[in-house]
Amino acid sequence: MIYDLGLSLAFSVVPIINHKYLPSCSISPPSLQVAVPVPSSSPTSYYVNSLIQILHCVSDNLVQCDAETKICALFDDNFDDLDLELALTCFEATHKLTFKDSFWKSDVEDFEENTLEEFIETHLDTTEQTDPLHVTKRFLFYERSFSDAMRDELEGPPPTLN
């Protein structure tokens, strides 16, 4: 019977990657899973909780935050604007959503006083991305930011004249 075959396959799924090579994230590794729909009662809360998990993972659990944490409170010696950009890029890839173009064109100072919840409510465009290259474009954008940051670090500050 087709129903029996489908049911037996659903319970014989095996993860496709080895756990020991993943960073110490509390997020489960990818496997053959059924997509879970966003709860209609509080989509903002769902997205905020997801962003918090991603921030924990990207920072190797060094950043501890909740929905009321301000963006500026995330930054320290172990977490900078490049880490935040990586977390947001991962968020977009995870949910097939994007942050508004106005956000990507702004400076971190423009939204650093927002809580994580306010940030999601203000800057997240909840229209599902259907462009198959969306994730590729975002990671290329991140790669350029990373390259710029590395170049700036290698060049150092300009010399001062005495």
Image (tube, rainbow, N blue to C red):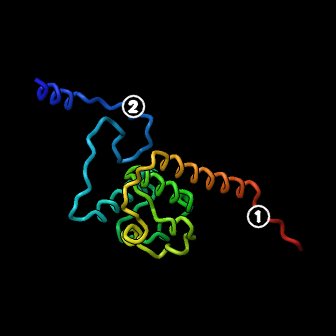
Which quadrant holds the N terminus? top left
What residue do we see at 40% from left, 56% from top? Answer: 97
Identify the residue under disc 2.
Answer: 18
The extreme front residue here reads 131
Mark 1 or 2 closer to N-term?
A: 2
Label 1: few (<14), some or many (≥20) within 10 Å?
few
The extreme right residue here reads 162
What residue do we see at 41% from left, 53% from top? Answer: 129
Identify the residue under disc 1.
Answer: 157
| Picture coordinates of residue 132, whole percent (x, y) | 45, 45
Q: Which mark is residue 122?
A: none
| Picture coordinates of residue 119, whole percent (x, y) | 42, 69
| Picture coordinates of residue 67, whole percent (x, y) | 35, 67
Mark 1: secondary structure:
loop
Mark 2: secondary structure:
loop
- Which residue is nearer to you in this view: 62 or 54? 54
* Mark 1 → mark 2, Cα distance in angstroms: 42 Å
- In the depicted structure, whether residue 35 falls above or below residue 6: below
| Quarter occupied by residue 125 | bottom left
- Which residue is nearer to you in this view: 132 or 95? 132
Q: How many marks?
A: 2
What residue do we see at 52% from left, 52% from top? Answer: 138
- In the depicted structure, whether residue 44 falls above or below residue 7: below
| Picture coordinates of residue 17, whole percent (x, y) | 39, 32
- Left or right of 161: which side holds 1? left
Which quadrant holds the C terminus? bottom right
Q: Amino acid at mark 2?
A: Asn
Q: Amino acid at mark 1?
A: Pro
| Quarter occupied by residue 63 | bottom left
Label 2: few (<14), some or many (≥20) within 10 Å?
few
Looking at the image, do the residues carrying marks 1 and 2 touch, with CB atoms under 8 Å apart? no
